[in-house]
């Protein structure tokens, strides 16, 4: 969405943006932006031309990259030109800025992949193209052109917790029970083709956001399946919520059947190969489909294996073994179909996040205390 700040914004046609999407959901948009040129200086009176307008990206609620693409197809975003110096106004007025409204969670990069800025909350703003300088004595009263470049806006969802699991583990069903979200649910893999955000509501009005993301498959770190489209969204979640089917997982009749323990290790390996820092996040494990036959027995076997996972690594092919296992804060047996364990899981998700907030607050307090001690020591 583009807002005119103080006057008309010049819009010029350009090539079609490059889009990456899940169906109609777009999470990557490439556009051309240019700052306005500066105004001419006035040589005989020493007048200075106005600076060209700047181009900004501003985080707003209710905006999506698809809305930007639909409303402004094949267009550039160009700021206004600075006013020329004149007898009536020796100092030319600044050109009109151009604001592009974008969703929260945007990372902005140039074509070389260098990060220009990020929009992590509503109201965050990043300048992406500077206006040119007005003509002055320094430039022999000649103006300069505005900065022009192609930028990429890449959406990474911002959520408190992100659901991590293989297709058909029951993530969507679980989210629908935990929150008021209504993701697509069916008995076949890959029902989640676009991210869904659900809100967990508590009796004291606390709200926690949970993202249901497209299911992983083996080789996701190599961009197989939803690959990087899934994994990049995990980066901005505070906590990982692993979801596994207690009976195991088989993508197709040709694929091997993985036990719940093997599924957890495979998920861990995929996250590790994509970005090992993801494994430093807090994690909760939901063992789903506890209403199925022999689920209790399988859950006991899983708990035994998770006590000392390395002792069972010999059962896995070497390429499936993670460097280190995930340390789960809580392991909760649940059934999305019968609602068994849902309230306990909800409470554990909150407790894990609250514990993380307490730890971060304590670290912040200690850092401030250390800084205060250092300052006191310096001036004594």
Image: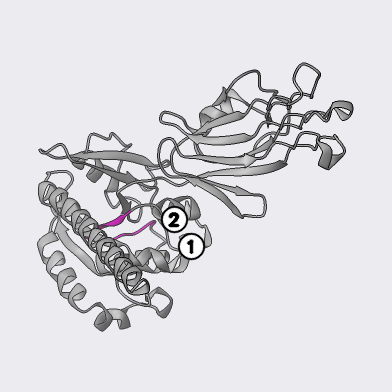
Q: Is residue 108 left or right of residue 295?
A: right
Give the magenta part as a residue range: 238-252
Q: Position of residue 206 (x, y in %)?
A: 18, 40
Q: Position of residue 295 (x, y in %)?
A: 14, 60
Q: Nearer the viewer, residue 155 or 215?
A: 155
Q: Is residue 289 visible?
A: no
Name the residue at 42% across, 50% down.
Answer: 233
Label 2: which residue? Answer: 231
Q: Is residue 315 left or right of residue 98?
A: left
Name the residue at 39% across, 69% down.
Answer: 269
Q: Is residue 241 magenta?
A: yes
Q: Residue 143 lies in what quarter of the image?
A: top right
Confirm or deny contact between disc 2 and disc 1 (CB under 8 A).
Answer: yes
User: Which type of secondary structure does the marked residue at label 1 adopt?
Assistant: helix
Gap between marks 2 and 1 measured at Cα: 8 Å
Residue 150 drawn above or below residue 348: above
Q: Nearer the viewer, residue 171 or 360?
A: 360
* Number of other residues with Cα within 10 Å of mark 1, as a class: few under 14, some 14 to 19, many 20 or more: many
Tag in front: 2 or 1: 2
Label 1: which residue? Answer: 221
Image quadrant occupied by the C terminus: bottom left
Name the residue at 80% across, 36% down.
Answer: 136
Q: Is residue 258 left or right of residue 100?
A: left
Q: Position of residue 113 (x, y in %)?
A: 62, 54
Of the image marks 2 and 1, the number of the one nearer the N terminus: 1
């Amino acid at each position: 969405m583009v807002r005119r700040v103080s006057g008309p914004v010049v819009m010029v046609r350009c090539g079609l943006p490059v889009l990456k999407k899940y169906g109609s959901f777009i999470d990557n948009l490439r556009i051309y932006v240019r700052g306005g040129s500066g105004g001419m200086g006035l040589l005989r009176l020493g007048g200075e031309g106005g600076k060209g307008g700047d181009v900004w990206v501003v985080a707003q609620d209710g905006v999506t990259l698809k809305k930007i693409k639909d409303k402004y197809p094949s267009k550039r975003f160009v700021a206004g030109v600075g006013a020329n110096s004149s007898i009536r106004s020796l100092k030319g007025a600044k050109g009109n800025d151009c604001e592009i409204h974008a969703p929260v969670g945007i990372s902005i990069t140039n074509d070389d992949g260098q990060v220009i800025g990020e929009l992590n909350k509503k109201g965050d703003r990043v300048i992406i193209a500077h206006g040119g300088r007005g003509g002055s004595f320094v430039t022999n009263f000649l103006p300069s052109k505005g900065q022009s470049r192609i930028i990429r806006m890449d959406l990474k969802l911002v959520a408190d917790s992100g659901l991590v699991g293989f297709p058909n583990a029951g993530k969507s069903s679980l989210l629908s029970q935990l929150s008021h979200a209504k993701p697509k649910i069916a008995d076949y893999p890959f029902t989640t083709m676009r991210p869904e955000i659900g809100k967990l509501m508590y009796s004291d009005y606390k709200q926690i956001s949970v993202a249901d993301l497209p299911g992983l498959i083996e080789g996701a770190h190599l961009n197989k399946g939803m690959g990087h489209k899934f994994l990049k969204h995990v980066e901005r979640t505070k906590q990982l919520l692993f979801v596994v089917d207690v009976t195991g997982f088989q993508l197709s009749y040709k694929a091997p059947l993985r036990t719940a323990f093997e599924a957890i290790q495979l998920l861990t390996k995929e996250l590790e190969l994509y970005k090992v820092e993801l494994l430093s996040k807090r994690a909760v494990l939901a063992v789903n489909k506890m209403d199925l036959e022999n689920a209790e027995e399988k859950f006991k076997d899983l708990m035994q294996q998770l006590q000392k996972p390395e002792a069972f690594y010999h059962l896995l092919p070497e390429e499936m073994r993670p460097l280190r296992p995930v340390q789960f804060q809580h392991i909760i047996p649940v059934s999305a179909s019968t609602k068994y364990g849902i309230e306990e899981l909800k409470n554990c998700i909150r407790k894990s996040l609250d514990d993380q907030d307490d730890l971060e607050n304590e670290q912040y307090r200690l850092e401030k205390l250390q800084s205060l001690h250092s300052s006191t020591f310096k001036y004594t």
